[in-house]
Image: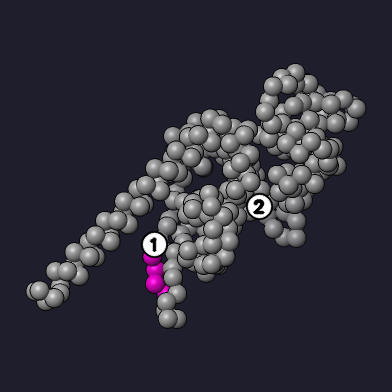
Amino acid sequence: MGDVNPQDDQSAETGYRIWAADKAVYGPVELPILVSWIKEERVLADTWVYSDGEDSWRKASAIPELQMFFRVGAPSGAGAAGVPAASRAPGTGLKPGALRRIKILADLSDEQLARFSAYLERIEVRQWTEVVKQGQPGDDLFFILEGEVRVRLMIAGKESVLATFMAGEVFGEMALFDDGPRSADVIANQNSTLLRMTGPLLQKLRAQEPDVATYFLFALAKSLAARIRADNRRFRDSVSFARSASPAGG
């Protein structure tokens, strides 16, 4: 930490301060900068970090939004308990351009995507894994970086597939906003790489990166509107078909 210059901007709405090895306090800095310092080994698991949002000092590895960076083991990128680092935390080998595969993020700049990625968790899902279970509470959405999933309902013991989502698409949006129970199961059709955003991380994104959050929420709203319109068309077509197939005057 000796080569880090102090930050004099005290106007940051939410930030972090770091108690460095030279006994000086650096900050406030925002989460993406702190993440970059962790990757550069300027901030270690035992480094004391003050969070403006929580008004307390804690070791970096004890701060929820930073824990994912220390669960993967050594800074060299080696995984813990056989889990590759790339399967866990954001920023572990995922370049900004890779996020542009997600349709609703395609227009963000590389700099914005780099900031956005600090609020995501990368998850590797094996084929046939139940990613989401109907009826269970949830507060997160998922982006499909690679692979494919299906949305299903089990009716009278039989599976009814409602939709199939492929790489570049997103699912689970409603739970991100209302914490309500999941309306259907989501199953991985093949080995998939997902990026997850939780409700708390969305709140941090809004507070710390308002420009990126505004774009993301607007793009998400457009995606939801398009999906609702498509569902309305399918419902209208099914009603029209049922009426045309019924006997005259029935």
At mark 1, the secondary structure is: strand
Q: Residue furthest bottom?
A: 157
Circle 1 residue: 163
Q: Who's the residue at 53% across and 67% down the image?
A: 135
Left or right for 241, reference 216:
left
Camera-near label (2 vs 1) is: 1
Give percent across and percent down for residue 204: 63, 39
Identify which residue, 234 or 99, lies in the foreground.
Answer: 234
> Which quadrant, please, contains the N terminus?
top right
Give percent across and percent down for residue 176: 54, 50
Residue 160 is a magenta residue: yes
Query: From mark 2 to mark 1, how far is it between C-alphas?
Result: 27 Å
Left or right for 205, reference 215:
right
Left or right for 75, reference 107:
right
Give percent across and percent down for residue 10: 73, 21
149 up-or-down from 226: above or below: below
Q: What is the number of the mark on residue 18?
A: none
N-term mark: 2 or 1: 2
> Which quadrant, please, contains the C terminus?
bottom left
Q: Who's the residue at 60% across and 49% down the image?
A: 198
Of the residues shown, which amino acid type is indicated by label 2? Arg
Classify residue 161 by image quadrant: bottom left
Q: Residue furthest right?
A: 23
Give percent across and percent down for residue 141: 53, 52
> Which stretch did the figure color magenta?
159-163
59 up-or-down from 23: above or below: below
Q: Who's the residue at 39% across and 42% down the image?
A: 222
Classify residue 28 by image quadrant: top right
Circle 2 residue: 88
Q: Who's the residue at 62% across and 34% down the image?
A: 207
Residue 124 is a magenta residue: no
The crowd level at tag 1 (other Cα within 10 Å; few <14, some 14-19, many 20+) is few
